[in-house]
Amino acid sequence: MTGTPEKDLDEWTTGDEPMTGPQESYLHTLAREAGEDVPEELTKAQASQLIDRLQQETGRGA
């Protein structure tokens, strides 16, 4: 296995902080490709979950 091991989102110490600028930018790119809108004021953990889902839908996560 390559890359960094994923940590359970419930264990993130900063998961309830607002999403980062790069997360927001990438989410908007993925959402546009998937024909979806990005909800306002997501947390880092919520943004990560949405990124994972949208990557699967758009094929970018392969």
Image (tube, rainbow, N blue to C red):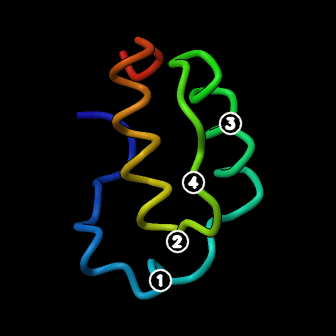
Earlier residue among tags 4 and 3? 3
**Residue 6 in the figure: left or right of residue 36:** left
Q: How far apart are marks 2 and 3 (CA)?
A: 15 Å
Which one is nearer the viewer's eye here, 54 or 60?
Answer: 54
Bin the neighbour count of mark 1 within 10 Å (Cα to Cα): few under 14, some 14-19, many 20 and up: some
Marks 4, 2: nearer the viewer: 4
Secondary structure at numbered mark 2: loop
Q: How far apart are marks 1 and 3 (CA)?
A: 20 Å
Q: Are the residues tagged 2 and 1 within 8 Å (C-beta)?
A: yes
Q: Are the residues tagged 1 and 3 within 8 Å (C-beta)?
A: no
- Say above or below: 53 vs 61: below
Which one is nearer the viewer's eye here, 37 or 7?
Answer: 37
Three-letter amino acid code at the position of disc 3: His
Secondary structure at numbered mark 1: loop
| Residue carrying label 1 | 16
- Name the disc covering residue 39, or none: 4
Q: What quarter of the picture does the C terminus occupy?
A: top left
Earlier residue among tags 2 and 1? 1
x, y percent for residue 49: 36, 51
Secondary structure at numbered mark 4: loop
